[in-house]
Amino acid sequence: MKKLSLSGVTVATVLPFNDDLSIDWKSYDRLLEYCTTPEGIAAVFVNGHAGEGAALTPAERAEVLKRTRAFIGKDKPLMSGVIPYSTADAIAQAQLAQDNGADVAVLFPMPQFSAGAGNDPRFALDYVDAVLAKIDIPVSIFQQSVASGSGFSTAILAELSQRKRVVAIKEGSADITLYEDNLRQIKAAAPDVAILASNYLWMFAQMATGADGILSGMANMTPHWLCALWKATVAEGLPLMRAINDRLYPITRTIYGAPPLIDMHTRLKMGLAHLGIIDNPIPRPPLLPVLPAAAKKIIETVDKAGLREFV
C-alpha cells in the first residue's frame, strides 16, 4: 500500500458549472491553481459533497479524478468521495476511483443509515468490509453529524479504524464533546489512523483539542489561512492560532452559520465567483442558487476579509 501523509490541509474542492450545467473545466483549472498549490496543502478531495459528487455521472467523476491528478502530480494524495445508495453502488464507485487515479476512497454513510445504523455496528462494518474486499487502495470513513442520524457512534468508529487499509476518519460529528471522545478512543484503538478535523464552524477548537490534519471545503476560499492555522497548531502557537481564527470567523459564519445549511457549498461558489476564481456560482439541482440577500452578504464578507490579496 502506498504510504500516505495527510498531515496538513486537505481541500475538498467544489466543482464549477456552466449555465447549461456542464462542467466548466477552465474555471476548475483556475480553482486548482488557487487552492491546491499553497504550502501546507497536503491532499485534494474530489467528488464529495463540496464537489457535488452525487450529481455527477460516473464518466464525470472519472474525468474529475483524471484532471485533478494531472494537475497535482503523482506525489500529492488524491481522495475521492463515494456517495452511494447501495453497497453495490459503493463498490462500483470505489473501483472507479481506484481505476482513475485516487489514492483513497472516502466512504460516505448511505441515506438508509439514518434510520439507526449509526449505533448498530453490523451495517457500517459490513459496508466497509465489502468495499475493502473489492479494491486495493485504502479508505477513509466520512463521519457526518450525529444529529442528522447518519453519524457513527464512537465505538463503531473505533472498530472501523482497526480495519486494515482504513487510514483516516473525516471527523464531522458536529459535537465538540463527541469530537474529543472520538479523537481519544480512535487514537487508543488505532494510533496511525489520521483524524481529519472537518467541523467547519469551530476549526480552532478542534486544533486546540488535537487533530492530524484539516479537511475542509473552506480551503477552496481560504487555503492560505487554513494552512497558516495548521502551521500554528503544529508549532503550538496559541496567540497566532487565535489571530488566524479571528480572520476566519466572519467567513465561516457567513458560509456555514446561516440557514439553510444546504446552501453552504453554493455560498463558497458565490465567493469564488466574486473573486474571479470561477466564472459561475451555479450548482446542479437539487441544489439551487443562493438568494440575492445571501449573495450580497457573501460578497460584502469576502471584500471585508481582504481575500483578494491571494488572487
Image: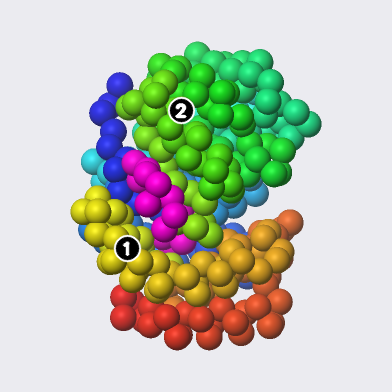
Seen in the picture, residue 251 relative to 50 is either above or below; the reply is below
Q: Which residue is mark 1?
A: 241
Picture quarter with the N terminus: top left
Can residue 95 be seen? no
Nearer the observer, 111 or 72: 111
Magenta part of the chain: 204-220
Residue 287, position in %: x, y? Answer: 70, 60
Looking at the image, residue 39 sits to the left or right of residue 18; the answer is left
Residue 16, position in %: x, y? Answer: 53, 63
Regarding mark 2 in the picture, which secondary structure is present there? helix
Seen in the picture, residue 290 relative to 52 is either above or below; the reply is below
The mark that comes first in sequence, 1 or 2, is 2
Residue 59, position in %: x, y? Answer: 55, 42
**Contact (Cβ within 8 Å) of mark 1 with mark 2:** no
Q: Which residue is mark 2?
A: 185
Looking at the image, residue 260 sits to the left or right of residue 233; the answer is right
- Of the numbered discs in the image, which one, if any, rests on residue 209? none
Residue depicted at x 28% and y 66%: 240
Residue depicted at x 57% and y 23%: 156
Q: Quadrant of residue 5?
A: top left
What type is the residue that disc 1 sits on? Met
Regarding mark 1 in the picture, which secondary structure is present there? helix
- In magenta segment, residue 14: no
Can residue 265 be seen? yes
Count of marks, rendered view:
2
Picture quarter with the C terminus: bottom left
Residue 31, position in %: x, y? Answer: 40, 64
Q: Residues within 10 Å of mark 2 (few under 14, many from 20)?
A: some
Residue depicted at x 63% and y 36%: 151
For this orientation, the residue located farthest to the right is 115
Q: Residues within 10 Å of mark 1 (few under 14, many from 20)?
A: many
